Image (tube, rainbow, N blue to C red):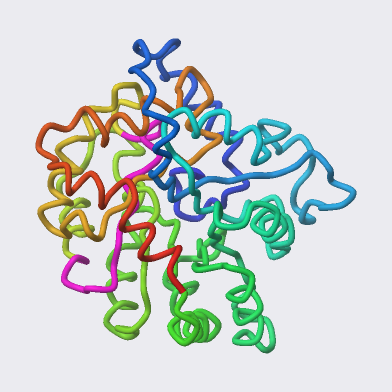
Amino acid sequence: MGGMNPSVSAHSRRRFLQVVSGGALAGSLARLPAADPAAGKWIDAHVHVWTPDTKKYPLAPDYTVADMLPPSFTPGELFAHCRPQGVSRIVLIQMSFYQYDNRFMLDMMKEHPGVFSGVGIVNENAPNLSGRLKVLAEGGVRGLRITPGKTPIAEWLGSAGMKALWLAAADHGMAVCPLINPEALPLIRAKCESFPKTKVVIDHFARIGMAGPVEPAQLDLLCGLAEFPTVHVKTSAFYALGAKKAPYTDLGPMIRRLVGAYGAERLMWASDCPYQVQEGHNYADSIALVRDRLDFLTEDQKEWMLRKTAEKVFFQA
């Protein structure tokens, strides 16, 4: 997910996980019975995969093999976690290790047709941005991850390149997927006002609850974006939010508030693997929060959050 400081990029994930592990539950609650794998109808809307083969898929200049924790997380390793829980389709999120080189993600999408959709990363300042997005869209990419890194948030979101990206995303039917902290929500609101045709998917509740209990004022800002019909929210990365321990039911009130604001039709569950399956956490507890443990959700709302919203945004041309 990246660190708490909005100026810190996903490069700090390793250090963040070490911090989280200090307060994480040493062991999770007993696993719930697995969902029927034959059904296989659920969609995980946020997973990172990578390979230890750094010769074929070299890391970006700012990264080393030591940053790859775990050293490997391939589709096969992912399937061992998700398929027993009835998850048959996944939205792959371009891993920061590879920066703008989306080849591994695209190759895995080709290798597993119909299983994966993708969210890529592009340099918004690169020439022929629209042409680059066209190539990604033809490869099955349906979204673009954006995150400020070390650039001040206002400068980052207000740049000419970011304006071009939001325009081009709308032209190619791609969602802009901000990885941000809550402080950036007012600036995202301004972007939604300026680009009403651009689909938006906010990652990980905008990291509300990462620093501790959910702050009502921050949740108000996130719920306020529901007035824009193109905005969606990922209810995801439970391991890193609030109490940071299973069964994650302390996040239930935040999810209930978002359901009231957005409707389940604009919310989607995601695990944020492989980080959800480290430090005493497991995959079953993540999906179980939405599937089994929130009694205020109707069966229809669960269908939207666990499948239909992600299907609509990421699996339909």
Does 282 sit left or right of 299 as displayed? right
Magenta segment boundaries in residue numbering: 225-241
In the rendered image, the residue lying farthest to the front is: 38
- Near-viewer residue (159 or 234): 234
Q: Where is residue 238 shown, x and y percent of the image?
A: 36, 35
Residue 312, quarter of picture: bottom left
- Find out whether residue 240 is within the magenta segment: yes
Query: At x 27% / y 54%, what residue is drawn?
Result: 267
- Find out whether residue 15 is within the magenta segment: no
Does 237 sit left or right of 21 as displayed? left
Does 159 sit left or right of 207 as displayed? right
Query: At x 13% / y 58%, what residue is drawn?
Result: 261
- Near-viewer residue (315 or 223): 315
Query: At x 74% / y 61%, what residue is drawn?
Result: 103
Q: Where is residue 199 shown, x and y percent of the image?
A: 36, 73
Q: Where is residue 155 shown, x and y percent of the image?
A: 47, 74
Q: Where is residue 239 shown, x and y percent of the image?
A: 40, 30
Query: At x 62% / y 47%, what residue is drawn?
Result: 11
- Near-viewer residue (110 or 19): 110
Vertical side of 46 occupied by 34: above or below: above
Total number of numbered discs in the rendering: 0
